[in-house]
Amino acid sequence: MLALLFTRFTLRHWRSSLRQSVLLALILALGVAVYFSVRLANRAAVASFQDFSELITTQSDWVVSSPSGELPESALREVREALGDAPVHLLAVVETTGAKPRDPQHEEEIGTRPTWTIMGVDLVALTNFPATRRNDAAWFSEGPGNFWSVFANPRAVYISAALAEKEHLKPGSEFPLVVNEHVATLTVAGLIPANQAGAQVPETLLLMDLPSLQALAGREGRLDRIECLVQEGPLAAQARVTLREAVEKKGGDRWVVSSPHDRRKAAATMTQAFRLNLTLLSLLALLVGLYLIFQALDGAVVRRREEIGILRSLGVPPRMIQAAWLVEAAALGVVGGVAGGLLGWGGAQVSVRLVSRTVNALYYATSTNGARFEPGEFLLVVALAVVASVLAGWLPARAAAATPPAQLLVRHAAPAGGGKMTRLPWLGLAFWVVGGLLLLAPPLRLEGGGRFPWAGYVAVLCGVFGGGCLGASVLRVLARLLAPAGAWSLPLRLAASHLRRPSGRHGLAAACLLCAVTMTGGMAILVGSFDRTMRGWIDRTFHADLYISSDGAQSASTRNRISPATWQAIVARPEVAEAAPSQFAPVTVNGLSTLLGGVDLGLMHRRVDMAWVQEPRSGDIFDPAKNSTLALCSEAFSERFRLHRGDAVDVPTPAGFKRVTLAGVFADYGNERGSLLVERTHFSRWFGHEQLANLALFVKPGVSPDDLRASLLHDHPGLSVFTNSRLRAEILRIFRQTFSLTYALELIGVIVAVTGLGLTLASVLLERRAELTTLRALGLRHGEMARATAAEGAVLSLAGTGLGLALSLALGWILIFIINKQTFGWTLQFTVPWLQLAAFAALVLASGTTVAFLVGLRSARLPADREE
Amino acid sequence: MTDSDAPILTARDLVKAYEARRVLDGVSFSLRRGERLALTGPSGSGKTTLLNCLGGVDRADSGSLVLEGREVAGLSADELASLRRHRVGTIFQFFHLLPTLTAAENVELPLQLTGVPAGARSGRVARVLDRVGLAHRSHALPSQLSGGEMQRVAIARALVHEPALLLADEPTGNLDSANGDNILALLEGLSEETGTSLVLVTHSPEATRICHRVLRMKDGRMLPEA
């Protein structure tokens, strides 16, 4: 019977209103597509974290690195000593980054050029690796002359086939690249051969001989890691365990011995919170799609009520009617899921770049440009679409099953419709109480130091659900307020009369609008607060006239530095009054990666108006003579490591662990991993170099910063020099850019909610066919009937928007003080962008009223015969 | 010809078709001021369609319909709406009271539509509700009224603005016989008192008894008068 109902009724209804059916499937497909594309992009971005060495050779068994970020070359000898004469191949690796030189004709924006990874390995050692590569001879055959000529040219570099094709490079070609403060001209030595697995080498990976890269990057005598590969043999498995133990024992806490799996996992956990947040946002798109499916199926039940009544009269049991509607929802899910999966795969090719850009800017270098089609994921997302669609169709299916047989189907008597919960104000209050209690719960601490504010998110849901439950009550109040106006305006009287006892549909429409307005309003408050806090922070922090860094520094993963010779020459220029040099190194503290900075703390104290979360109790931290065991940390560091003023922390350095005591905690919005600041003189002593990450200059009175900038850029084309105003503008631009996806999704939410309002009113009017007939018979004009519906829509919009805006204040508070604080550890100044919210509310009210008017006009124009 | 003899409504050769089927097939008749006319006929004969055309809710495809000397066929949708609100009252089989308005508010509706000031409306509503015997139920919602009471409210609503033409589609079709008789007596009395012309679509022989003339329809045509 189910098949009969599906083929004779469902499919025929779809066919008869083909456009509507296609639109419905497309709506679901779009929701699925957004979710799927973000999911694929996330996977691709994580998968793109590569031990690049894997791409040029086979996977090593373990990697030796240092918690301080770099190993002395002597570590290679020590590892060999630990291994004895065991058949283990070692590959020393240095990595740095670079970027294409900027176009001098254009004002450069930070982060717009891709970051290239330059990997330095001992090419001779590489060729001695076991013959597990696909083509051992490739290294020797691809060069301009022979393999050994590579060693004669310190700028010889192997490139990927992808880059060669894109930039039309071939062996012998030259191309410029900014590394540190230099624009280096590199020569293509050959193409990087594919590894054993045939994996594609990303176009942003370059390969050099180890000593050449150490010289180019100014990192002579230093290594990033040592890759270890146990030679295959009958005892290899056991040897891997014992040898690793031997290396770990030898290194003690100086070394971190990890497997490629550990490293990949660490990268995945590093971005876990970011990806989770993105997935939640993408689920929002799926949810709004479902809401529209619900509305559309609900409307279809109303339209087909007589048909259902006839089927019931003919003996079709209610359970079968319900099943038929669920099958229809499931079929819609299959169609929408398949279409959405394909669309999402296409969308992933775009979104993967957006996700990669963020991962690149905030976490680590990624090289992915596209997302693979994964059949398993595709099937999973289709199944998700089906389940979601069936859930969305559940209430309409129940309403259909509750339709009485035709004999009892009192003509024009409307069923109550769904949304019973929207008429239970006590439930709304209960949701709010639960949400309030949840705010006290701590975040979930993820592996790798990330924090997931689960309770904050659930509290937000409770707040929104609670508001939804109160929607109908608000409608009643508004209807009572509106009632006196009914004496002067018939449309208002009709609207008020309908909302005095709002139906479930009314409540649901108001609830959904409320949800969208709350989310958008809350996000506006978060962004507004962020914006104001950032501007305040920038005003307090950035007081120098010029900010200098390597022009190759285009992302968070940059390794480019300014050499002592260069920055000392700049500082010595007569135009410079004072300079603030900063050194930074990525370090691993308590197993979590963070940033250690060396700055002139005294100068910082004098020149920067620090925003203290916990102010230092004495001035010792600012005195180089007294601060060798003191440090300041950012708020994010304090939150992440759960360390506060007065706590001690062991900082790994090439000179061993240094125990410092936290003297204060400052507000900082630079990164979510947190940072630790020590006096630069100590930093350079511990790390054995004076290479700067950046340099801030204060010019003497009368000196034009613009002139000095021009002069510096002329003298040092490999440097990036920003004036104070330009840097501030860039920081704000990057900050605002990160919210663009959020804005887009929120806008979709509001459009869908307003569309949902239109669909609701269309269903409601369909149920009121008899009333429309009466009104026409009484002499109401089309316009007057439409105005009555518009007034109803306006009140619905007002209820949704009013309560939504009130709730958005609470949501904004939760986003700022719970979710943001727990995720990023940043304290923001709560700011309500009243003007923006008012404009937004006016927009929602106007669109809601307009949509309602159009629906009313359409319904008023239904021919009389179709009304009867 | 006296004023009361002059036709208030004249229909000539009205034709209305839905796809290939002619629902009205050359219907002609006239109605005098104060006259009560019963339209009878089997289901599907076109009675309700004719009533819809008379009330300007639907349009005939061809033919002429003159109400109070004014050709209805050429009127715009807004003009038709204006005609209905000022000159026509309608009573339905299923009452069609607005479920969210009280009895008094339902009755007040046509007055509000015709722009009667709020102060004047309440008195007229009270009077007409009193006339139909429902003054004590003025604040009740339709769901709180019996079928007979609902139809009384519907009659009050149809007459409160003193229309020239009252159209009633099976007004007793959904009532028991006692209530039906009461409603018919009420309609007859009110029509006499106000001089309102009445077109009554009915299957009920009792209903035809309150009418001056009975016209029979079959297959969209008007049968010759007996």
Image: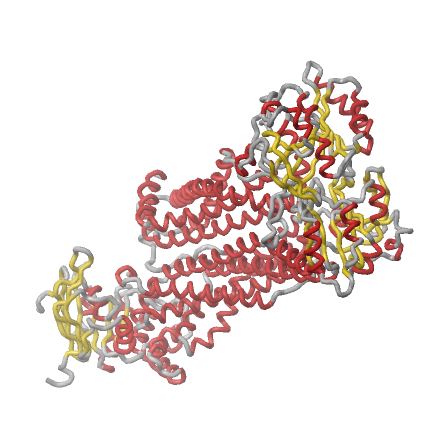
Q: Along the line of sight, which residue is nearer the eye, A126 or B222?
A: A126
In the rendered image, the vertical position of residue A308 relative to residue A70, given as above or below = below
Q: Along the line of sight, which residue is nearer the eye, A817 or A634?
A: A634
The part of the image, by quadrant, that contains residue B107 is: bottom left
Position of residue A433 in the picture relative to residue A692 (left or right): left
Position of residue A385 in the picture relative to residue A131 (left or right): left
Q: Residue at x 62, y 20 (%)?
A: A132
Work out which residue is located at the far top of the displayed protein and give it: A234
All told, the count of numbered labels is 0
Q: Looking at the rendering, in which quadrant would you find the C terminus of chain A?
A: bottom left
Residue B32: image x %, image y %?
Answer: 15, 78
The part of the image, by quadrant, that contains residue A157 is: top right
Residue A339: image x %, image y %?
Answer: 43, 42
Q: How did the renderer colour the structure?
A: secondary structure
Position of residue A557 in the picture relative to residue A797 (left or right): right
In the rendered image, the vertical position of residue A819 relative to residue A802, given as above or below = above
Residue A408: image x %, image y %?
Answer: 33, 54
Residue A628: image x %, image y %?
Answer: 88, 47
Residue A224 seen: yes
Q: Residue at x 36, y 67 (%)?
A: B146
Q: Looking at the rendering, in which quadrant would you find the N terminus of chain A?
A: top left
Residue A36 seen: no
Work out which residue is located at the far right of the displayed protein and give it: A625
Q: Along the line of sight, which residue is nearer the eye, A330 or A701?
A: A701
